[in-house]
Image: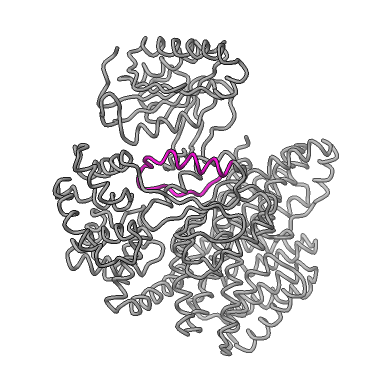
């Protein structure tokens, strides 16, 4: 047998596809014979190139090779040997530096190789980029693009050995599941049980247990593993930043990038929604019941410290880690800090002493930088019984966790303790700038808290587990400075909202959208705190600053919600009422029509005129013109558009940049276009293009280019349509500015129909229609003419082929549909 390779090692996992089905088809005797032939063929192929057999279990092999090229040769020969037999295997190949645990290996590279194999299909070998870099060009690897594996790592490029044709890889295609900071360890049984319940038709599954038991991490992994069963995606809805039950539905809509009535937008779709940290918004549980009743195919996976207690709920109590899994977790986390820590009686005793709680074990493992496992155990034996005695009213596991956090807290220096407590004021992470200004954070102290596993770094943001944040919040309130810090937090994010609003048009607009999206939880918290404190004027001004972000980031329903709360505050000040009505109008103008919307707009116009603020009146007139134009009242719409231009002359310097010349000109051009006056629309839109280029706003430019594309479509200049659509899509950074991408699909569909490609037209129409329904937009928001082109295309291919192509398009995400427009299949 070959010696166990060390250092840089190429790992190979194989598995038989459909082994249970194959057993049923062949019968026991024939299957046993085929299985033996499979084992002999693979062992011979791998041994030929020096493969080391790490493990064999049932129908799966795990091999290691000292050379990447030898691993690929072995896999190639193994697949070839099985080509004509009844058994088809899938293989995953990855190169890394796994730690030796003779006769096996441990580490992230092992998990990654297994996940790569799990993404493949029978007869297919998938290879990581790390392996590809060590090979020459003679192996015929085909680039499969970037994929997220179910180990929830960041997207990575994968390759296929050979030119065979296979279905798409079993990876996370439609999902926003987060990338965890560390690998998932153990819990295989729990993941299987949760997956089985979801597969068996459980529609509401709640994972319960006290903080620190790993509910969130388990739920995320189980959701990833179940992704294949949910054609409309697996969506994570983090509720830790949400304290108001009324914001639960908007939070779900935001995660799914939906607007409008949530149940109507989900409809018959089949998504899995993971609602994380539901305990602080438990009053919203009846709304989930209503969602389940209205949407027959949706499934909910919820984490909460207590069950929701609504009809149809199945509870799954998350147990402690088993001894072996606890030890593995300790050693993996310790290895990140001080390599070389070995399994021992002390490590096992630490994990038992901490009741197998993952968070408690990770906090203890973080101490190996300065303490041996024996010293950690000795200190736990002294410290925890003392602490436990003071909190007998809590369940044992929760006492253990709280005591472990308290133990870590009390080992901190005074400056670390003070900052640790103060940072609890943030609800969804924070930047260094935010920590410095709100809490007086120093970088050295932050880095020390990260090193002690009380915080972690996520890109440019610092984050904290919700359980640890709760403990820090208690310390903050005990110190008597919680109210003052929340005031500072709210003031910081009010200013942040204004600063980003000033950058939301022009060369910095993409960065402004990204920053606003990252801080949305803190912005919500600041806005809510400002309203609770009776600072209604400041809250109204903050809503005004967030105006374009509500549009760009898909928060139209939330804009309406905050506007109605402002109106309900009882404040009669004209400035507050005008801004509140505009916040409502911003949401309803895009999504709705009819007398109710017009009544809101009419009142907003009346109040804005009385106020006499040219900037606020500009926003109101924009909404009014849009609503009137869409209703066919073109003369009235043009009057409002022209008044917008006059408002610009009265605006003082430093007004919000969306109140600008290209916006006003584009609105005028849109109205002319809707009423079919192309000769009037085109020169105005050409001026809007020049104005958008001068101010450096790619977002505004994209919208104007699409209106010019609509004119080209009307005039039969289809090549121009396609050129303008592609140029417009170059301005889009999803998920921001979703409406530009959606309207581009609608125009491209008509151009494809006109140019004799009806199935492409149908697919694009399906993608556009699905996005429009998803966002709650009942009708086209911008003028996209020539519907008859689609009718002709449908008649050309027939209803059956057309419907199938539309369905294919509707399954695309918006990003995938954009990619299809730009590059085809």
- Front residue (pair 389, 461): 389
Whether residue 632 is visible here, answered yes or no, is yes
Question: Left or right: 818 with respect to 656?
Answer: right
- Front residue (pair 568, 682): 568
Q: Quadrant of residue 221?
A: top left
Instruction: Check the picture and name the quadrant holding the N terminus.
Output: top left
Q: Is residue 182 magenta?
A: yes
Instruction: Work out whether 793 lies above or below 535.
Output: above
Instruction: Check the picture and name the quadrant holding the C terminus.
Output: top right
Whether residue 507 is visible here, answered yes or no, is no
- Image point (78%, 52%), residue name: 714
Could you say where residue 666 lies in the image, as x and y percent from the top left?
Answer: 65, 65
Question: Left or right: 66 with respect to 34?
Answer: left
Instruction: Work out whether 58 lies above or below 78.
Output: below
Colouring method of the image = one colour
Write down the region rendered in magenta: 174-199
Instruction: Work out whether 397 lies above or below 282.
Output: above
Could you say where residue 740 lies in the image, as x and y percent from the top left?
Answer: 62, 55
Could you say where residue 761 lies in the image, as x and y percent from the top left?
Answer: 73, 42
- Image point (51%, 44%), residue name: 194
Mark count: 0
Could you say where residue 108 lies in the image, as x and y percent from the top left?
Answer: 34, 36
Q: Is residue 64 magenta?
A: no
Q: Quadrant of residue 805?
A: top right
């Amino acid at each position: 047998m070959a010696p166990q390779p060390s250092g840089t090692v190429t790992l190979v996992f194989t598995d038989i596809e459909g082994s249970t089905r194959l057993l049923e088809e062949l019968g026991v005797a024939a299957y046993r014979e085929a299985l033996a032939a499979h084992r002999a063929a693979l062992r011979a192929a791998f041994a030929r190139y020096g493969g080391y057999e790490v493990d064999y279990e049932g129908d799966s092999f795990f091999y290691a090779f000292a050379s990447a090229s030898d691993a690929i040769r072995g896999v190639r020969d193994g697949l070839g040997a099985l080509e004509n037999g009844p058994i088809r295997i899938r293989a995953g190949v990855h190169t890394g530096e796994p730690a030796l645990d003779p006769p096996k290996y441990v580490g992230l590279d092992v998990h990654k190789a297994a996940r790569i194999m799990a993404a493949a299909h029978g007869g297919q070998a998938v290879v990581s980029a790390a392996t590809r870099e060590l090979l020459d060009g003679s192996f015929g690897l085909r680039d499969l693009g970037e994929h997220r594996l179910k180990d929830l790592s960041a997207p990575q490029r994968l390759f296929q050995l050979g030119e065979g044709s296979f279905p798409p890889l079993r990876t996370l295609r439609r999902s926003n599941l987060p990338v965890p900071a560390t690998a998932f360890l153990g819990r295989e049984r729990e993941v299987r049980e949760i997956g089985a319940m979801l597969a068996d038709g459980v529609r509401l599954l709640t994972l319960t247990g006290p903080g620190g038991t790993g509910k969130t991490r388990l739920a995320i992994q189980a959701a990833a593993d179940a992704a294949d069963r949910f054609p409309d995606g697996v969506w994570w809805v983090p509720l830790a930043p949400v304290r108001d039950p009324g914001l639960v539905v908007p939070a779900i809509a935001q995660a799914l990038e939906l607007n409008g009535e949530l149940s109507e937008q989900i409809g018959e779709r089949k998504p899995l929604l993971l609602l994380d940290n539901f305990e602080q918004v438990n009053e919203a549980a009846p709304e989930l019941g209503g969602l389940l009743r209205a949407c027959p195919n949706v499934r909910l996976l919820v984490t909460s410290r207590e069950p929701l207690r609504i009809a149809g709920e199945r509870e799954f109590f998350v147990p402690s880690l088993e001894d072996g899994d606890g030890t593995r977790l300790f050693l993996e986390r310790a290895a990140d800090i001080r390599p070389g820590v070995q399994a021992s009686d002390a490590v096992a005793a630490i994990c038992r002493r901490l009741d197998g709680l993952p968070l408690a074990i990770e906090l203890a493992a973080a101490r190996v930088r300065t303490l041996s496992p024996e010293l950690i155990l000795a200190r736990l034996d002294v410290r925890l019984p003392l602490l436990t005695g003071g909190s007998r009213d809590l369940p044992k596991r929760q006492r253990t966790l709280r005591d472990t956090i308290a133990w870590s807290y009390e080992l901190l220096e005074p400056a670390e303790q003070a900052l640790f407590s103060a940072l609890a004021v943030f609800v969804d992470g924070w930047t260094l700038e935010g920590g410095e200004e709100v809490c007086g954070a120093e970088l050295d102290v932050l880095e020390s808290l990260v090193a002690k596993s009380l915080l972690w770094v996520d890109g440019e943001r610092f984050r904290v587990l919700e359980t640890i944040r709760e403990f820090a919040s208690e310390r903050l309130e005990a110190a008597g400075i919680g109210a003052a810090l929340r005031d500072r937090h709210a003031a910081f994010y009010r200013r942040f909202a204004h600063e980003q609003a000033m950058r939301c048009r022009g060369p910095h607009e993409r960065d402004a959208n990204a920053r606003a999206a990252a801080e949305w939880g803190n912005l919500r918290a600041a806005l809510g705190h400002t309203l609770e404190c009776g600072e209604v004027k400041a809250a109204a001004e903050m809503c005004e600053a967030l105006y374009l972000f509500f549009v760009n980031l898909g928060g139209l329903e939330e804009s309406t919600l905050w506007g109605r709360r402002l109106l309900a505050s009882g404040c009669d000040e004209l400035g507050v009422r005008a801004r509140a009505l505009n916040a409502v109008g911003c949401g309803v103008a895009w999504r709705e029509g009819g007398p109710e919307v017009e009544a809101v707009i009419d009142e907003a116009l009346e109040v804005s005129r009385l106020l006499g603020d040219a900037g606020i009146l500009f926003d109101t007139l924009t909404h009014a013109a849009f609503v009137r134009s869409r209703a066919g009242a073109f003369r009235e719409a043009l009057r409002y558009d022209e008044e917008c231009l006059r408002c610009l002359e009265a605006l003082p310097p430093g007004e919000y940049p969306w109140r600008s010349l290209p916006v006003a000109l584009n609105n005028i051009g849109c109205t002319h276009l809707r009423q079919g006056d192309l000769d009037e629309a085109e020169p105005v839109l050409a001026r809007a293009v020049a104005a958008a280029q001068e101010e450096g706003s790619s977002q505004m430019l994209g919208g104007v280019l699409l209106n010019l594309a609509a004119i080209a479509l009307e005039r039969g200049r289809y090549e121009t349509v396609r050129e303008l659509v592609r140029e417009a899509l170059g301005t889009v950074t999803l998920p921001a500015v979703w409406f530009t991408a959606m309207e581009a699909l609608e125009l491209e569909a008509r151009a494809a129909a006109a140019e004799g490609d009806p199935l492409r037209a149908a697919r694009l129409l399906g993608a556009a229609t699905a996005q429009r329904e998803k966002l709650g937009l009942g009708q086209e928001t911008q003028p996209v003419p020539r519907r008859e082109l689609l009718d002709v295309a449908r008649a050309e291919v027939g209803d059956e082929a057309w419907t199938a192509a539309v369905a294919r398009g509707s399954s695309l995400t918006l990003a995938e549909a954009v990619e299809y427009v730009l590059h085809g299949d």
